Image: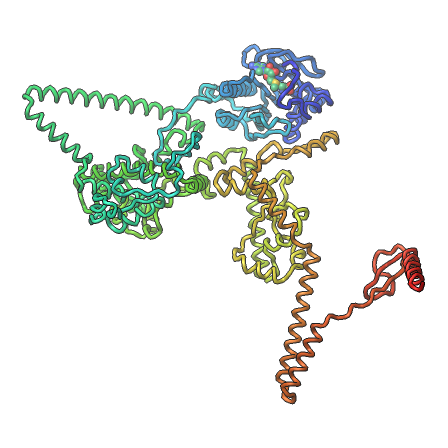
Amino acid sequence: MAIQKKHGKGRLDKWYKLAKEKGYRARAAFKLIQLNKKYGFLEKSKVLLDLCAAPGSWCQVAAETMPVNSLIIGVDLSPIKAIPKVITFQSDITTEKCRATIRGHLKTWKADTVLHDGAPNVGTAWVQDSFNQAELTLQAMRLATDFLIEGGTFVTKVFRSKDYNSLLWVFNQLFTKVEATKPPSSRNVSAEIFVVCRGFKAPKRIDPRLLDPRTVFAELADPAPNNEAKVYNPEIKKRKRGGYEEDEMLQFKELPASEFINTTDPIAILGQYNKLTLDGAANGDVALAALNKLPETTDDIRLCCQDLKVLGRKEFKMLLKWRLRVREIFGFPSKKTAKQSLIEEAEEVATMEPMDEELKIQEELQALKDKESSKKKRERRRANEQKQKEIVRMQLNMTAPMDIGMEEAGPMGEGAMFALKTLDQSSAVKRIAKGKMALIKEDEAKKDHDSGLGSSGETDSESDEEEDRLERELDGMYDQYKTRKGERDAKYRAKRLREEKEDGEWEGVSADEKGVSDDEVLEEDSDDDEEEDEEELAQKALIRDLDAAPAADGLSKRATRFFQQDIFKDVAALLDDDEEAEEDSEEKAEAAQEDEVDVMDVDDEVEDIPAPKAVKQKKQKAPVAEPEDSDDDDFEIVKSDRKDEVEDDDESDWEDEHKRRKDPRPEIDIITAEAMTLAHELATGKKSSHDLIDDGFNKHALKDRDGLPDWFIEDESKHDRPQRPITKAAARAIQEKTRAYNARPIKKVREAKARKKFHAAQRLEKLKKKSDMLANEEGMTEKEKASSISKLMAKASKAKPRKPLRVVVAKGVNRGKSGRPNGVKGRYKMVDPRMRKDMRAMKRTAAKSKKR
Ligand SMILES: C[S@@+](CC[C@H](N)C(=O)[O-])C[C@H]1O[C@@H](n2cnc3c(N)ncnc32)[C@H](O)[C@@H]1O
């Protein structure tokens, strides 16, 4: 790669300048320097292979850092200008010829380190390019496996694309330690990341599929859509850029319930309106009056109509069922009646058809059925084949069960190998739990299953089917309803988002519903199946919905898998540390409370901080060791650990504050616009705590300034922190807060005022006591008592004469003294001799002129 003049995108940055200053051929040199600083592989290597080495800056760094007499070989498609102590040649690393040339150079040696910084011509087609890069990386890996020594290191550039995880997986199969890092010199705008693979396992035989891009990067078919998930995570719709319809400006929308009965799209109504009115008889709406009088219009229904925005799944279904019943009563055509009439029609027609015609129809029907079943078979076979492939990939650890849609069905899903659900339904699980074998006859299981909805003991499969269908339809409608509701209601959207982020469960069922017995639950709602009593749950310990159960740390299964990747190992350790520290601090706080030490609330300390200048951005958890790049932490929380400062503060203030705050948790004060923005994003669900953790991993995490010139470090420290976005509102809020802080008097003034107040209160108390004593004095007349009390009051209200001001001349021992002059008590003023002389002279002349 020839050196290009780099303009635009701030390419001529400090790293570029530094590279020039140090004589490196490319700024990329610093990436290797920083990687080596962190992992120290160059010093330990005697043989190094640099794949895609042009213009050769990595080779330069290697030659500088590796021990003398090391063997360094650099290869690239482009010519590389000669570098002392480095063998270079021009070749395509994906070819056999290149392999042979390297072998020729290495002879019997093996490489301790293989570097790869390859980048195919990166153009505008990002998807294509990133794939080529991933493919090139895999090719480099292949070459590396041929030449690397056991325990050797492979360092490669990878682009964060959809193939990234697949590549990491491959690396993990071949190396004991794989870590991804982004050195500070790597541009923020670049999607590149460097993976350092250490401890090459040097397997005797490597499955060729492991290094075959077609297998490694094979696309997965889209899993079947999980409609159920949509209930819990309604899609976020785009804003209406074209403006809003007129009635959409209304906050509260009502509709006569009769329209809800009439409509063909009841979900739309439930999603758009806030209330269904039932009392419109005065307006002459006869249908509404009739509806109002129907026994089907129960109090529950009326209650549901009052506020459509708070409907849970149960209420939602109740309203729709009510609508269907009313429609039946009013004689609206329903699906049932339509089907009935169709059957009748068909029967009528059938009686009119001659016999041979009937046979013909039957034949046609049979042919259609056959065609249908063969089509289904074909589809099933194809799906099976697909699944088989996925399973092979899964066995190779290249994919997780969730990626091939197994998650959707789960171990209890349809077609599961061990039909635990069936076992569950036939209550055989209880027997198995007791350690006995249980065999379930298929039809028995089916029977049990069939009786699921008909609580009344109905075994009529047709009516069950009908009920199932209705339930399914209602569920589907509920999905739609939620989506529409979400579209209209920003608060609801935020709530959903929060729930989604926390992978929380849907909480549409009220607590008292949970107390309903199983039979009732089945009658009410099939979804309420989950509501088992504890005992039964314990018995069903055999059957667990792995997908539904959140991980111990509250992460979803998918998230847990993601964080199980090796690159998060350190993070986990860090987090653990944090947690431990948190626990520590909590324990300490508790202990402190127990000892009844004056532990102040954070609030108090914050109250005490006079001006923002004094507000230091400190971590909340004081005992936690500061992370390496603590100055990168923009979101910082202030926690009181300066007890002494607080102790000085106004006592009554403290007590008030203490009473106000019952929550023992430390209060967080937000003092920067960045933190305020972040807090707002967290509160509105735009960001989750996972995002925060993610944000913490950036190129600034690695700071290595050894051996860099001062001007560089100075410049670096100005800009080497992530720029977090701030909103106008957040900036304004912080400004107001700052103004409020500034408006408060300084601590000394407040203390003096408080002292004054305290003394006045003490005086008043004394006065009260004295006047009480006087009032109770038996030997005094009322008049005497009154006069002595008024004398007391007059004495107390009389201001004490101020001691005269003493003027001290700053001479002798007092010359240049800044504090109280020696031997002077009370009020004083220091003056210099010249000033006193001048004053006296002025007085004299004034007196003289008066005399005249
Ligand atoms: C970012 S540059 C490498 C910079 C180098 N590490 C340094 O420090 O100077 C990427 C190089 O990959 C090379 N490259 C891309 N595809 C290649 C291939 N198939 N075989 C060999 N080199 C390739 C390009 O010619 C280009 O010079």
Q: Position of residue 66 (x, y in %)?
A: 69, 23
Looking at the image, which residue is at 72% across and 29% down? 712
Res. 546 in view:
no
Q: Which is more toward the observer, 119 or 752?
A: 752
Report the label total: 0
Q: Report whether 609 appears left or right of 457.
A: right
In which quadrant will I find the C terminus?
bottom right
Is residue 679 depicted above or below 42 in this figure? below
Q: Position of residue 32 (x, y in %)?
A: 64, 25
Is residue 134 depicted above or below 178 in this figure? above
Q: Report whether 684 appears left or right of 115.
A: left
Going by the picture, which residue comes out furthest to the front? Answer: 852
Q: Report whether 241 appears left or right of 95.
A: left
Q: Report whether 395 appears left or right of 133.
A: left
Q: Which is more toward the observer, 19 or 258?
A: 258
Is residue 258 depicted above or below 52 in this figure? below
Q: Position of residue 249 (x, y in %)?
A: 40, 38
In which quadrant will I find the N terminus?
top right
Q: Position of residue 364 (x, y in %)?
A: 15, 20
Looking at the image, which residue is at 28% across and 35% down? 265
Res. 485 in view:
yes
Going by the picture, which residue comes out furthest to the bottom? Answer: 779
Looking at the image, which residue is at 58% across and 21% down? 148
